[in-house]
Amino acid sequence: MLLHLLNVLTAFRPNQFSKKLKKETKEIHDKIEKHPFFIDLLSGDLPDYKYAIYLYNLSPIYSSVEMYFFKNTINSDYVRSKAVIQDLQNYNKTINLDYNKFNFNSEWIEYFFHKSLFFKKTELYVRWLADMYGGQFLKKKVKYSSKYEFVNLRKSLKEVRLLIEEGLNETNIDAFIGETKRTYEFHSKILDKIYELTEESL
């Protein structure tokens, strides 16, 4: 398993703009990785209902991104929304929630639709790469892990990264970095709201 993951991580050699993107967004990326939501998830202390609400809020984000970038593909490695829904349905077998009370993504989605197609790719960087990299560790900690399962992780990772890099240049890289940070911030806000929930609020 470790050897396979190392092969995946070295499957793509980023160009100078991709390297700058990673460097300039490292601080906010690391901050989210250390969010109490993920700390509890990794330690096994995150309640299933909080993770289910997380999936519920991410589902329309995945669907929105796919509508622009993967509309004509049936490749499950790219169409992640189906995997998210599958996991959510499995959680719903034992969890009974009124999800309408926990819709925290409206601001994120509205902002997404107002962005140009080029800047919409920041969602691929924040969400798809997160599933392809960190998700390979997280899938061992969740009850249902379709969201983190890929048919050909190495190939799909390379192709998604190439899609992200396409069009990146010295005139737009700084703006792309700024938009990526904003996308991370939207994700973080959802984590904050979910983490603050208690069973009494259900």
Image (cartoon, rainbow, N blue to C red):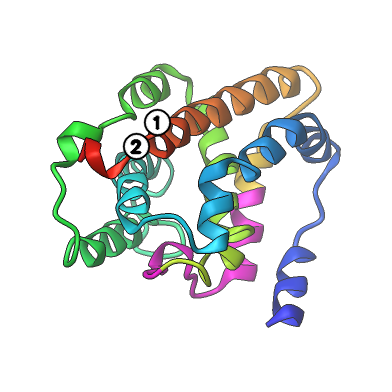
Q: Residue at 35% of width from left, 26% of height from top?
A: 109
The answer to whether residue 33 is left or right of residue 27 is left
Picture coordinates of residue 67, whole percent (x, y): 33, 41
Q: What amino acid is found at the position of numbered circle 2 in the picture?
A: Leu
Picture coordinates of residue 36, whole percent (x, y): 56, 43
The answer to whether residue 19 is left or right of residue 72 is right
What is the secondary structure assignment of the residue under circle 1?
A: helix
Where on the picture, by quarter, is residue 47? bottom left
Where on the picture, by quarter, is residue 103? top left
What is the secondary structure assignment of the residue under circle 2?
A: loop
Picture coordinates of residue 169, whole percent (x, y): 76, 27
> Which residue range is magenta in the image?
143-161
Q: Residue at 25% of width from left, 63% of height from top?
A: 91
Q: Is residue 150 rendered magenta in the image?
A: yes
Q: What amino acid is found at the position of numbered circle 1 in the picture?
A: Lys
As drawn, 73 above or below 166: below
Of all residues, the one furthest to the right in this rendering is 16
As drawn, 150 above or below 186: below
Q: Nearer the viewer, residue 158 or 130?
A: 130
As drawn, 152 above or below 200: below
Alpha carbon separation for disc pair 2 and 1: 7 Å
Q: Which residue is mark 1?
A: 193
Q: Which residue is mark 2?
A: 197
